[in-house]
Image (cartoon, rainbow, N blue to C red):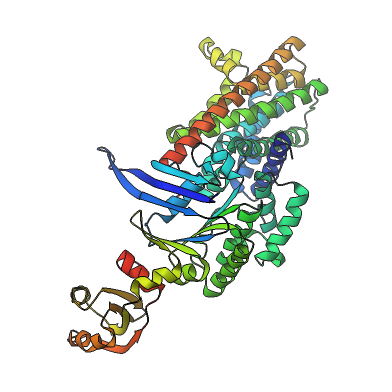
């Protein structure tokens, strides 16, 4: 049996605008997605903000009712058998909210353990173990309001694991964390993976998906545009070379112009403090550099390098530069 | 762990955690301690000409006013406040029915609100030097227990109605004093126009006030107290049954409208 099965899932939000002449508008968050997560798999959903990742997770965790399609978790329907699912899953949504800030870390966990009917004696041992796992044992009795963002997110992980769930949903768990905090959290996820937990992870960090996930669904505008292993996804761009140019104040018109060139497959710009890095995917390799440089009339250029494509480049190709 | 034992445990832990959080909340301290104190002082001045048992009437009445304010403002917002703190999704996504959590939260509010009665008692005895004694202590304790239960159950209805209809929530201030008056916390409802009496009968706080006033002052016969107890039990059962339907409806609607979390 698959841990998660999704068939033609769809979710439409209705929003209203105006005060006197109210108008209802429909926004398609998830259009039509299908996938399954095998038992023991760490499955990733990768996509830009607003792609439909969180909406999908909320439907799978029974917090949203789908507009259409079928979704099952451990064989149970998310609409008709929500109650059967809730005791078997754990979930976290990225960010600091969702905890009781005026309570200590250990009191938060005691409370959430009672919501999941965990026997008090079992809960005590489990809380000790989880606080150790997420590195919060020495701060357990302090109020959450004094915790850093990373500590709160690690406490969320502990909360989600209190009842030893069969399926774990991690929605952008490292968002907003400093590099050290994010690395520690990824190590916690790796440890869970080694325990053969069924995990669905959403992220918009390519390296995170590459490092952790066995398979990745790239989602864009509510649809899955690619679904494969990280290695297979990288092959999408294996015939390409990436030319990276450091530029200073490049106009958007020039970026658009470069994108229309026959030797350019894809182009994207990343801001890095005062400069920008222009990333050009091309099948012509380093030979394309002179043609490219010839287009920079009057724009200051810094370092130019070529490199092999990564998962990020495959992602950019798939979602059209909306990283 | 059996289901009902797990529910009971969850109610007690929820109440414990709510009390711990409330200790640092100044608004809650105002609703429970200072507002009933002000009402008690005003009532003492107004009723001192009446003589007799007015002191205990003020202690019980102002205590109930604190209880009602706490339930209306804090209990009424119990689901909405979870939404604002981002914890509602975690609660709804757990296997525990949400009404058990709200029951535990209301229990905490009601229990701590009994502190209003203690404050009023101290005011009357220490500051005003009046003699306060409970005429039927045993029956008074039973009345107090039933009051706690019926207020907690009434709070379930308030919380779900406030979530369903935010316009009702905006009337919170307007709902506070009519119930003081209609339930006879500080003045007998006989002083009110006759057409308001049926409304009073529909409110469980009215029966709670009846039971507490009659057992504390010793006025009225025991059959009236029994009737008040019966009405509190009956209304609690009705509130519980109704709240199950209301919560099911509220949660289904929230999952359709995507309003469990703040976007």
Q: Count the marks: how many? A: 0
Q: Position of residue A318 (x, y in %)?
A: 33, 65
Query: In which quarter of the view is residue B32 placed?
Result: top right
- A221, above or below A292, in the image: above
Query: At 52% from the left edge and 72% from the top edge, which residue is drawn?
Result: A178
**Of the pair A61 and B238, the residue shown nearer to us:** A61
Q: Position of residue B165 (x, y in %)?
A: 44, 33
Q: Position of residue B179 (x, y in %)?
A: 56, 25
Query: At 52% from the left edge and 12% from the top edge, which residue is drawn?
Result: B193
Query: At 24% from the left edge and 85% from the top edge, which residue is drawn?
Result: A288
Tell me the quarter of the image containing the N terminus of chain B: top right
Q: Position of residue B237 (x, y in %)?
A: 64, 22
Q: Is residue B247 left or right of residue A314?
A: right
- B148, above or below B214, in the image: below
Observer able to see residue A42: yes
**Of the pair B87 and B90, the residue shown nearer to us:** B90
Q: Is residue A315 left or right of residue B177?
A: left
Q: Is residue A44 left or right of residue A244?
A: right
């Amino acid at each position: 049996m698959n841990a998660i099965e999704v068939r033609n899932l769809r979710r439409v939000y209705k929003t209203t605008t105006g005060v006197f002449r109210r108008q209802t508008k429909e926004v398609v968050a998830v259009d039509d997605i299908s996938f399954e997560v095998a038992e023991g798999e760490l499955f990733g959903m990768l996509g830009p903000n607003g792609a439909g990742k969180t909406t999908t997770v909320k439907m799978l965790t029974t917090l949203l009712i789908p507009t259409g399609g079928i979704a099952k978790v451990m064989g149970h329907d998310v609409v008709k058998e929500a109650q059967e699912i809730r005791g078997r899953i754990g979930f976290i949504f990225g960010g600091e909210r969702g905890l009781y800030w005026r309570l200590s870390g250990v009191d938060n966990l005691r409370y959430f353990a009672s919501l999941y009917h965990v026997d008090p004696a079992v809960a005590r041992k489990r809380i000790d173990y989880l606080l150790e796992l997420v590195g919060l044992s020495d701060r357990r009795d302090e109020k959450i309001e004094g915790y850093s963002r990373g500590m709160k997110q690690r406490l969320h992980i502990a909360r989600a694991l209190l009842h030893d769930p069969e399926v774990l949903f991690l929605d952008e768990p490292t968002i907003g964390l400093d590099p050290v905090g994010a690395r520690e959290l990824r190590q916690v996820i790796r440890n869970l993976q080694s325990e053969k937990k069924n995990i669905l992870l959403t992220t918009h960090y390519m390296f995170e998906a590459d490092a952790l996930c066995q398979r990745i669904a790239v989602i864009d505008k509510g649809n899955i545009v690619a679904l494969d292993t990280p290695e297979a996804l990288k092959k999408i761009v294996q015939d390409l070379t990436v030319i990276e140019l450091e530029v200073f104040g490049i106009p958007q018109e020039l970026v658009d112009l470069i994108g229309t060139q026959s030797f350019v497959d894809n182009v994207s710009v990343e801001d890095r403090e005062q400069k920008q890095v222009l990333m050009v995917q091309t099948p012509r390799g380093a030979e394309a550099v002179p043609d490219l440089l010839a287009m920079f009339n009057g724009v200051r250029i810094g370092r130019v390098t070529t490199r092999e494509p990564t998962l990020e480049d495959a992602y950019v190709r798939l979602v059209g530069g909306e990283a | 762990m059996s289901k009902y034992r797990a529910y009971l445990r969850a109610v007690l832990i929820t109440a414990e955690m709510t009390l711990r959080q409330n200790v640092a909340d100044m608004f809650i301290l105002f609703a429970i301690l200072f507002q009933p104190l002000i009402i008690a002082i005003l009532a003492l001045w107004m009723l001192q000409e009446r003589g007799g048992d007015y002191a205990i009437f003020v202690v019980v009445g102002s205590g109930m006013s604190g209880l009602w304010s706490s339930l209306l403002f804090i209990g009424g917002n119990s689901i909405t406040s979870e939404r604002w703190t981002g914890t509602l999704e975690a609660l709804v996504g757990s296997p525990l029915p949400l009404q058990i959590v709200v029951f535990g939260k209301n229990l905490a509010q009601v229990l701590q609100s009994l502190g209003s009665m203690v404050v009023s008692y101290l005011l009357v005895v220490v500051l005003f030097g009046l003699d306060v004694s409970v005429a039927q202590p045993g029956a008074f304790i039973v009345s107090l227990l039933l009051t706690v239960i019926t207020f907690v159950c009434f709070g379930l209805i308030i919380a779900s109605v406030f979530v369903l209809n935010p316009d009702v929530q905006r009337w919170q201030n307007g709902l506070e004093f009519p119930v003081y008056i209609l339930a006879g916390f500080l003045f007998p409802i006989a002083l009110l126009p006759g057409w308001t009496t049926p409304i009073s009968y529909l409110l469980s706080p009215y029966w709670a006030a009846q039971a507490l006033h009659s057992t504390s002052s010793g006025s009225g016969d025991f059959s009236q107290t029994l009737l008040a107890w019966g009405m509190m039990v009956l209304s609690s059962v009705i509130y519980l049954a109704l709240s199950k339907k209301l919560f099911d409806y509220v949660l289904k609607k929230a999952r359709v409208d995507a309003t469990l979390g703040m976007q």
